[in-house]
Amino acid sequence: MLHDVIILGGGYAGMAAALQIARARRRVLVIDTGQRRNRFAAHSHGFIGQDGSDPAEIARQARDQILAYPTVTWIRQEAIAARPDARGFVVTLDDGTEQVGRRLILAPGVRDTLPDVPGLQGRWGRSVFHCPYCHGYELDGPLGVLATGRGALTQALLLSDWGPVTLFLNKAFEPDPDQRRRLEACGVSTENAALSEIRGRSDVVLADGRVIVLSGLFVIPRVQPASPLFADLGCEPDEGPQGSFIRTDALKQTTISGVFACGDAARSSHSVSMAVGDGALAGQSAHRSLDFD
């Protein structure tokens, strides 16, 4: 079957794109591995109408609603290759089969790389976070920011609206005198000692043995698209504060004609709300492009 659009990734952005195409009565195939970025979180916040809901339930409801449209097909596999051909694009799945679509939307999400601190990875999405708008309101007490670069300054200053903040420099960032004055003016304290591990909920154990008790710890991870297929197709990347993402224009088309991208893999700022809006735009843009073939 020749699909009008193939979407690589069935997270929030991919599903939002699929919904637009399905409602246009076009044939859309979603290829998804089922690995949502926020799969470790128990609650999703900041998404209107679903504030505080289980993110897995939000995704389940969305998938059920999309699959109610007769032109939607969903395959739970990994796309391992993609190439252009005369019909559009050929996508190879991990079982060796191929799917063909006239347009391609890349919505693979991202992979997060965290600092190598014992105990940090296992608390990711539960008591260690990256987005204060998603998780800050629920935290009642002292907060921490683990520096991974200059972005920690902005994150620490921002978080001071949610509670008292300690910025753990961890040899990743050294504020200059003016930056230190800004931090002090917002009530942010700095800690120079290296981190040894994270214990309890999100308590920081320093190399000198001190323990800083926190209600939550924030860190800016390094990110990259979870699939390399954008590069295989020749789509150019951009570099943001957290890492690389897929370059798109205002209508979410990549640097390759007929290939669109959306969600965390195609923007420098991330949240469920932003991913959904991004996906809706990509879906509409891909659909409109079909009418001008």
Image (cartoon, rainbow, N blue to C red):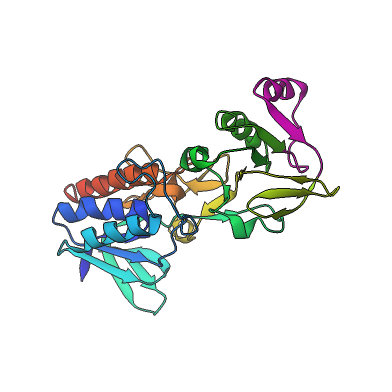
Give the residue drawn at x 31%, y 70%: 75
Residue for point 65% across, 34% down? 165
The one of 30 and 169 positioned closer to us in this rendering = 169
- Residue lying at the far front of the rendered structure: 140
* Above or below, 230 relative to 174: below
Residue 179 shown in magenta = yes
Vertical arrangement, residue 195 with respect to residue 71, above or below:
above
Q: Position of residue 235 (x, y in %)?
A: 44, 51
Residue toward you, 290 or 216: 216
Q: Is residue 60 left or right of residue 134?
A: left
Does 240 sit left or right of 273 as displayed? right
Q: Position of residue 189 (x, y in %)?
A: 72, 30
Q: Residue at x 47, y 37 (%)?
A: 133
**Can residue 68 be seen in this snapshot?**
yes
Residue 77 among magenta residues: no
Residue 32 image point, x, y percent? 37, 65
Instruction: Classify residue 198 as left or right of residue 193.
Output: left
Position of the N terminus by quadrant? bottom left
Q: Quadrant of residue 285?
A: top left
Q: Is residue 252 visible?
A: no
The residue stretch that appears in magenta: 168-193
- Percent position (x, y) of residue 124? 57, 54
Near-viewer residue (81 or 139): 139
- Above or below residue 42? Residue 141 is above
- Kindly indicate the quadrant of the structure image that contains residue 174: top right
Residue at the extreme right: 208
Count the marks: how many? 0
